[in-house]
């Protein structure tokens, strides 16, 4: 799981803002699969909670970076899977 920021222009105001596109990818039958992709206006834990809640079920393993909102949401939503984080520090343990 990770996010990527995008700069978008509001067509009504003409102003630019940064939004994050959240992504959950995994494998099914040995093949990569995109599980969910959704845009949010922040990288807060409530936004990550909403994203993770829409996935349904619990993965056996979570791989993510050490982003505060994401790691807290992963820890709260999936307390038991094994975890690998880019920093080497597991957020879920």
Image (spheres, grey):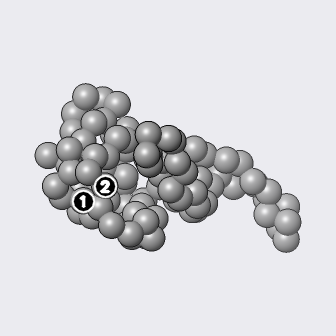
Q: Earlier in the sequence, mark 2 or mark 1?
A: 2
* Image mark for residue 26: none
User: Picture quarter containing residue 38?
Assistant: bottom right
Q: Sort mark 1 into few (<14), some (14-19) or many (20+) by Cα contacts within 10 Å.
A: some
Relative to 30, is 70 above or below? below
Image-based side of 57 in relation to 14, left or right:
left
Whole-percent x, y for residue 79 in the image: 18, 58
Residue 2 visible: no
Identify the residue under disc 2.
59
Residue at the spot x=79%, y=63% of the render?
Answer: 10
- Residue 86, above or below 26: above
| Neighbours of disc 2 within 10 Å: few (<14), some (14-19), many (20+) | few
Q: Identify the residue position indicated by label 1 in the image.
A: 78
Element at label 2 = loop
* Closest to the observer, 77 or 36: 36
Q: Residue furthest front?
A: 29
Q: Are marks 2 and 1 in contact (CB under 8 Å)?
A: yes
Which residue is at a point 53% across and 58% down the rendered structure image? 36
- What residue appears at the point 65 percent right and 52 percent down from the top-left corner? 18
Vertical position of residue 29 compared to residue 38: above or below: above
Q: How many marks?
A: 2
Give the alpha-carbon distance from disc 2 to disc 1, as whole Å.
Answer: 8 Å
Q: Position of residue 44 (x, y in %)?
A: 42, 59
């Amino acid at each position: 799981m990770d996010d990527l920021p995008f700069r978008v222009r509001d067509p009504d105001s003409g102003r630019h803002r940064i939004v994050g596109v959240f992504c959950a990818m995994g494998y099914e039958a040995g093949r990569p699969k995109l599980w969910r992709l959704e845009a949010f206006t922040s990288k807060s834990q409530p936004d990550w909670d909403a994203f993770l809640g829409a996935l349904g079920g619990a993965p056996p393993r979570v791989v993510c970076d050490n982003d505060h909102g994401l790691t807290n949401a992963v820890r709260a939503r999936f307390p038991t899977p094994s975890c690998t984080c880019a920093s080497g520090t597991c957020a879920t343990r």
